[in-house]
DNA sequence: ACAAATTTTTAGAATCGCCTAAAAATGATT
DNA sequence: AATCATTTTTAGGCGATTCTAAAAATTTGT
């Protein structure tokens, strides 16, 4: 598989775990920052190779084999991200770009060894689950902060937007994975939320609250 | 720069430290396992980008900038080889193929951190020197075993052929870098050599002796 | 149901990197 | 100097990936 094919598979995989059903040409084009006509071209090629189910005008979905390949690439991406943070002291806002390159390195043995070196991590630096060697993949239990009612508590377990700007914002306000968060109040006006993080209190906009994932505590 | 351009620069660099003078189209084609016409194509492109000096029928050489780029790639290649051996327990015959991929990863910070993690190594697993961050590069003092006179001693510091088959042969005969070697005798008939390695004695063919580098001891 | 708006595909072209076959230049031999 | 062999370049083409512009299909709105 070429780098380009791998990137398309990844994009299709990510789109299918968001919206429900089949994926549109335009959605892929937007995700990948290319033109729809280029997407159509590639979908034909991927279909020829048995990686996607594609029929003109009908949208696209991954085949068994396409899904397996996509998961292998995502596994590599996320393991490399862990490596960069754990072993090379990168911050969580720096690793994605580099992992975009490293994910295309082709060596099963390399990935197995890397996985072992890192102690078989289950999640990447952004809280996303790392697929297993044989394509096992389960999303973790989590809820957007913005969806939680006033009074509930939870632990921060992930981000939806993992752009460098958002991640740096979180750093600046000492919001990190593993942190306990409590919803103190919600403003009717703009849906911003008063939250407690450890000892601190903070008012976060709706946009922020809808990009932070919590694992709600049992007792809420 | 594309992967292909980087590979051509590397090939030209390596050829220029072997034979003397400018590099022929055919030599590059052979080194890279492509056709001469493809090489001509690429040389034009590299010349346009100011990476090589090229004039039709006159051979080619690296410009300042081309040499600098080539060294950067070789630096990455060799640092990754060290990483694979030191941190992921690969053997020295396994690392080259993977490093051929990793050398194209583009991130200065990544390489700086990797260099630091490895303790700023000076040589790769095959005894080849690792170019410095700013293009410093000096070949180490070494001599082919086949060139040494009977009675001389030295330490094994590198291999000329670093193919997996040769490296595995060396492993099998416990010849490793850092090993003390003494030339006991030379056969007139086929130039094979009787050598002593530590406690062991061994008869090696001329072909083997002309692919092992020693640093001759002062007193020889 | 039909026209308008939107989405998707096709047609045609560019670039990169490679190939084969033919032509041109260079170098060696008489 | 003329011929022959070798090296190198050119010409033309192919697959991969992308683009723009135009055509076709689908969806939406009245
Ligand atoms: Mn990422
Ligand atoms: Mn991630
Ligand atoms: Mn190597
Ligand atoms: Mn090496």
Image (cartoon, coloured by chain):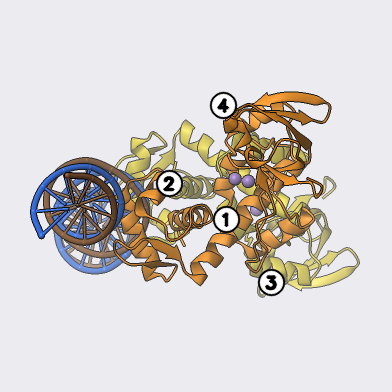
Chain colours: A yellow, B orange, C brown, D blue
Q: Residue at x 78, y 30 (%)?
A: B197
Indicate which disc, 1 or 2, sits on the residue closer to the N terminus. 2
Q: Residue at x 82, y 31 (%)?
A: B198
Quote the CA–CA distance across marks 4 and 3: 82 Å
Q: Is residue A212 left or right of residue A69?
A: right
User: Badge 3 is on which residue?
Assistant: A205
Same chain for mark 3 and mark 2? The answer is no
Q: Is residue A206 visible?
A: no
Q: Residue at x 77, y 59 (%)?
A: B116
User: Badge 4 is on which residue?
Assistant: B190
Residue A172, image quadrant: bottom right
Q: Is the shortest distance between ligand 3 and the CB of mark 1 under 8 Å? A: no
User: Badge 2 is on which residue?
Assistant: B32
Quote the CA–CA distance across marks 1 and 2: 20 Å
Same chain for mark 1 and mark 2? The answer is yes
Q: Nearer the viewer, residue B171 or B198?
A: B198
């Amino acid at each position: 598989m070429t780098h380009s094919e791998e990137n398309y598979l990844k994009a299709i995989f990510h789109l299918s775990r968001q919206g429900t059903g089949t994926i549109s040409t335009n959605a892929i084009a937007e995700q990948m920052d290319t033109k729809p006509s280029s997407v159509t071209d590639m979908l034909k090629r991927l279909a020829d190779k048995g990686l996607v189910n594609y029929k003109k005008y009908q949208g696209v979905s991954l085949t068994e084999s396409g899904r397996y390949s996509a998961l292998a690439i995502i596994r590599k991406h996320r393991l490399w991200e862990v490596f960069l943070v754990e072993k090379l002291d990168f911050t969580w806002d720096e690793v994605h770009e580099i992992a975009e390159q490293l994910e295309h390195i082709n060596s099963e043995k390399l990935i197995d060894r890397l996985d072992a070196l890192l102690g078989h991590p289950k999640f990447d630096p952004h809280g996303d689950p790392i697929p297993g060697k044989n394509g096992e993949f389960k999303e973790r239990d989590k809820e957007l902060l913005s969806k939680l009612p006033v009074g509930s508590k939870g632990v921060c377990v992930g981000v939806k937007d993992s752009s460098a700007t958002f991640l740096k914002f979180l750093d600046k306000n000492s919001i990190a994975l593993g942190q306990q968060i409590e919803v103190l109040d919600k403003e009717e006006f703009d849906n911003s939320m008063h939250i407690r993080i450890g000892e601190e209190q903070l008012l976060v906009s709706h946009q922020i609250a809808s990009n932070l994932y919590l694992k709600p505590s049992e007792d809420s």
